[in-house]
């Protein structure tokens, strides 16, 4: 239940952030999540994280600094929301890895849906606006895509350590950039591209390091 509530809070942060930031910028900063998972895997899961993976974590943090450029530009508050959401998503995935030891993926998805329903039922009626036909279609499509993606992530974490699964999520940045350009006519600026590339490279390096460590073992 706690794991599911963290997921609801994390989703809320990104919904708010997407109202104020381009989708590619949000995902470029949120790409630090897999590195947070790697860093938390040792103290919270007892999974081995070697020196090369720690280097990757520091590299990812440097990439985020390139994107937000603290001290060079005003640090907009939506950026802080994205970072907070990334941290919550990292804790959520660690918790998901823990419960997957005992529960099948379908159980985890069911809990997430039920807790989400209960949580938003307290605030939904206060902000309710009746959707039109197009909005209902978009809601249904988004819900189905989210359910399938969540089930796939749960299944993946059931089969492999969190530090191994996470680097694949860096493809999100590519999809976010494409969708932002095609749907919203938004394109990330130079520093967002550079910082996102650093974060992605750090995550991929962590993935190769983990694979190399397993091969050596």
Image: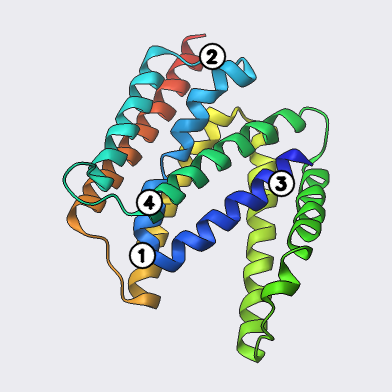
Q: Quadrant of residue 129?
A: bottom right
| Mark 4, residue position | 79
Which circle, 3 or 2, is nearer the viewer? 3
Residue located 41% across and 39% down the image: 32
| Mark 3, residue position | 5
Q: CA distance from mark 1 to mark 4?
A: 11 Å
Residue located 65% across and 48% down the image: 7
Residue furthest bottom in the image: 133
Question: Is disc 3 surrounded by few (<14), some (14 to 19) or many (20+) residues within 10 Å?
Answer: some
Which secondary structure lies at badge 1?
loop
| Mark 2, residue position | 48
| Mark 1, residue position | 22
Q: Earlier in the sequence, mark 3 or mark 4?
A: 3
Q: Position of residue 80 (x, y in %)?
A: 41, 47
Question: Is disc 4 surrounded by few (<14), some (14 to 19) or many (20+) residues within 10 Å?
Answer: some
Q: CA distance from mark 3 to mark 4?
A: 22 Å
* Viewer-closest of 23 and 217: 23
Residue located 75% across and 73% down the image: 125
Q: CA distance from mark 1 to mark 2?
A: 36 Å
Which circle, 1 or 2, is nearer the viewer? 1
Question: Is disc 2 surrounded by few (<14), some (14 to 19) or many (20+) residues within 10 Å?
Answer: some
Contact check, label 1 and label 4, Cβ < 8 Å? no
Q: Earlier in the sequence, mark 3 or mark 2?
A: 3
């Amino acid at each position: 239940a706690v794991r599911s509530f963290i997921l609801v809070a994390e989703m809320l942060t990104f919904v708010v952030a997407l109202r104020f930031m381009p989708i590619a910028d949000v995902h470029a900063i949120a790409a630090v999540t897999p590195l947070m998972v790697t860093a938390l895997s040792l103290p919270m899961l007892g999974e081995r994280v070697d020196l090369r993976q720690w280097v990757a974590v520091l590299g990812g943090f440097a990439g985020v600094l390139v994107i937000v450029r603290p001290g060079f530009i005003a640090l907009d508050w939506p950026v802080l929301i994205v970072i907070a959401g990334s941290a919550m998503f990292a804790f959520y995935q660690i918790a998901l890895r823990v419960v997957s030891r005992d529960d099948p993926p379908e159980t985890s998805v069911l809990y997430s849906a039920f807790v989400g329903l209960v949580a938003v039922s307290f605030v939904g009626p206060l902000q309710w606006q009746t959707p039109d036909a197009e909005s209902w279609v978009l809601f249904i499509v988004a819900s189905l895509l989210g359910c399938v993606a969540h089930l796939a992530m749960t299944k993946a974490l059931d089969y492999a350590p969190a530090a191994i699964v996470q680097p694949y999520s860096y493809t999100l940045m590519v999809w976010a950039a494409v969708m932002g350009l095609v749907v919203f006519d938004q394109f990330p600026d130079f520093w967002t591209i550079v910082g996102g590339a650093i974060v992605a490279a750090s995550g991929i390096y962590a993935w190769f390091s983990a694979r190399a460590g397993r091969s050596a073992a």
